[in-house]
Image (cartoon, rainbow, N blue to C red):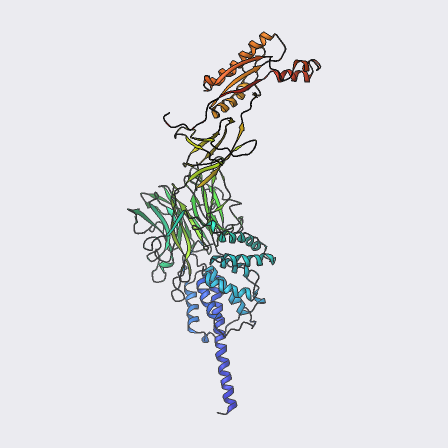
Amino acid sequence: MNTKHFQFTLALTAFLFINAFAQSNFVKIDAADKYYANKDYANAALLYAQVVNDTSIIASRVLPYKIQMVNLSIMPKDAKKADAVKKENISSDPKDSTNKKPAEVVKDVPVKPDSTKKAPKEPDPKTVSKYDHVLYRLASSYMLNADYNNATLTYKKCVDRNIYPDARYYYAMCLLNVKRPQEALNQLEAYVTSKPANDSLAKIAVKKEAGCYLAMDTVNISREIKVTQLDTNVFNKGNCSFAPSYFSGSNKIMFTSARKGNVVLDPKKEDAEYLCDLYWTELKDSTWSKAVNMGASINTHVHEAASFVNGEESVYFTRWSDLTPNEASIYKSKMMNERFFAALKLSDNVNMAGYKSMQPCLSPDGSKLYFSSNRPGGKGGFDIWYCSIDGTGHAGPAKNLGAPFNTVGDEVTPFIHAVTGSLYFSSNGLPGLGGLDIFKCELNPADSVLAFPLNLKAPINSSKDDSYFVLDRTQGKGFFASDRVECKGGNCYKIFEFLNQPIKFDVSGIVFDAETNAPLADALITIIDPHGGSDPVFIQSDASGNYFAELKGNMDYFMKAQKNKYLGSSASISTKEKTATEHFQQDFLLAAIPKGEIEISGIEYDFNSATLRPASKANLDKVVDLMVLNDNLSINIEANTDSRGNDKYNMKLSQARAQSCVDYLISKGIAQKRLFAKGLGETNPLIKEVDINKMVKKSPEWEAAHQKNRRTALKVVGETDIKIINKGQ
């Protein structure tokens, strides 16, 4: 063979070899793109990674986004296999029941059928190289499959190559998920200050910056809560487990699990390990019993998940459609003796065709059904919605819970605490530690208004997705699901139990002089149960005016501070409806007892009479409160008249009026020995007669002067020592 012929043959062989591998990559990309479009991110990542790691695709070479393949005979065996498996096994939505992960392509992939994650926006494929397209898709596939370590590395490459501005945002989210909040904050700041065209994502990024600060603040770790991952024999057996809920009491738990043994139509074609069914287990002698599949009345060959049990009557749960992509609906099954009847799909008010309605939860009184949905009309992706339930069980029109609960992000897994009425839910649109965080909104029982969402912090929340929070009636323990545990192919939802330390309450403060603001030592603080169920608690302020006392839960308290030569001060606090440890701060300002009289305004009598008018009694009630608060004081009730009329008559009338006031106070429970009636007639005017005579008779000024002299006042005339009263004295 001559040299030229040999060189030509070698070149042709090399060309055909390289071309074959290049075409095989296009086949892989085409197959991976289809996996990606069908939300099978695990298999998409597998094929994209093979392409990125293959040197036959050159980064600098700009290629058309899609190439028509005409010679499939050169396709490598593994790509053929993946494509064949894809055509045979992939559903239109990998979150529905037909998504049985093909073992030939990837195994042990986490199943999260309630996932709200959406594929990131992408650059125009005509503007980037094929390599950049694949690299960005690979990063997104890793992130959407909760493989945050690989996603972080790959998104960094996308940022370094400046593939797409939004890549920096998703890089930051992955950094937050791998517990690198400072780096995440830096990337978010760079993204926000670049003034990206994606305005909605920029707004979310600002909130995520607050979440970075939250994650960096070690104060936000609650050390009063113990979190434990539950065992792998009952709860966390198999691929993944999530959505715990109480079932017939706090000792029975219903939950969702993807594991072997789940209900399938054809075990040869479907892998039960990747199908979600509902299970239940019971706590007996500190041990959870073997998990029991809820059976064919509830579980079918499609995904069932996220259940809520309404007492002993029925169970609500989510079921995925086996016909319509991206659709999930809420069903209800009647229950009798822990046996279930065939489930019925709820009305169109709850379930909207073509959208997902899932994660049902009833209010404690059964009047409202809360759920998460991505239906139109919300604030963002998934929102919390609710329907009113009438006496027949019919659900009214769905209403959005609105701001500040719903955001442009996703809000999911609502739970209403049976006793306090507090709302718990998960969100990735509010400042958090990363992924979905669990939030709490306390219910104000006075006006039934929910408070602003409060992040439950670590260790309940983590840098990953945390959701499906439930809490027992006593608030001592509960459960939630989290994908903080790494598994092959990403992160898997597992069920965790948490134990609250006993909720504690206390009150502290300082007693001050109201005029000088100087702290008052040895002041007596009395804490009283106004309902009489508990004995009073007595405390004295220290040399710096400080005091401290522990309180009981579910109590109303009346508090008062007293000190000799001062008028007492009072306050009220309550630990009722409180769902977390709280430290109350209550300071007291004590005013010195006046040496002169204290006018009691608004005391009126009938003309030429000592009979109290109704308005006078209302004002005297304030004196009752004063005497109860200052139970160490004795007072004079002093009645005065103007100078008109006979002096002797005025003296008699004023004495009668003072006595009327004393009699009223005695009728309200004030001890007679603490009260003295003193009529002063016209002997103690505020405005002297000589000054009144200078005024125009019967003018408004003249009448006002006489009215000022016709007054009733009190004067402190006695004071006993204030001291702590021991029980039994």
Q: Position of residue 471 (x, y in %)?
A: 40, 44
Q: Is residue 193 visible?
A: yes
User: Where does residue 283 sit, x and y in percent of width and height?
Assistant: 31, 47
Image coordinates of residue 602 in percent, x first then y, are 57, 20
Please indicate, yes or no, whether residue 610 appears anywhere in the rendered image.
no
Residue furthest out toward the bottom: 2
Work out which quarter of the rendered image holds the C terminus and state it.
Answer: top left
Residue drawn where x is 60% and y is 8% of the image? 647
The answer to whether residue 667 is above or below residue 391 is above
> Which residue extends farthest left?
285
Name of the residue lying farthest toward the front: 543
Residue located 71% across and 14% down the image: 696
**Would residue 239 be found to the left or right of residue 159 on screen?**
left
Query: Which of 136 and 676 lies nearest the eye of the viewer?
Result: 676
Where is residue 395, by image quadrant?
A: top left
- Name the side, left or right, on which 100 lies relative to 715: left
Q: Is residue 721 above or below residue 331?
A: above
Seen from the viewer's position, the closer of residues 525 and 115 is 525
Image spot of residue 559 (x, y percent): 46, 31
In this orientation, which residue lies closer to the viewer: 151 or 380?
151
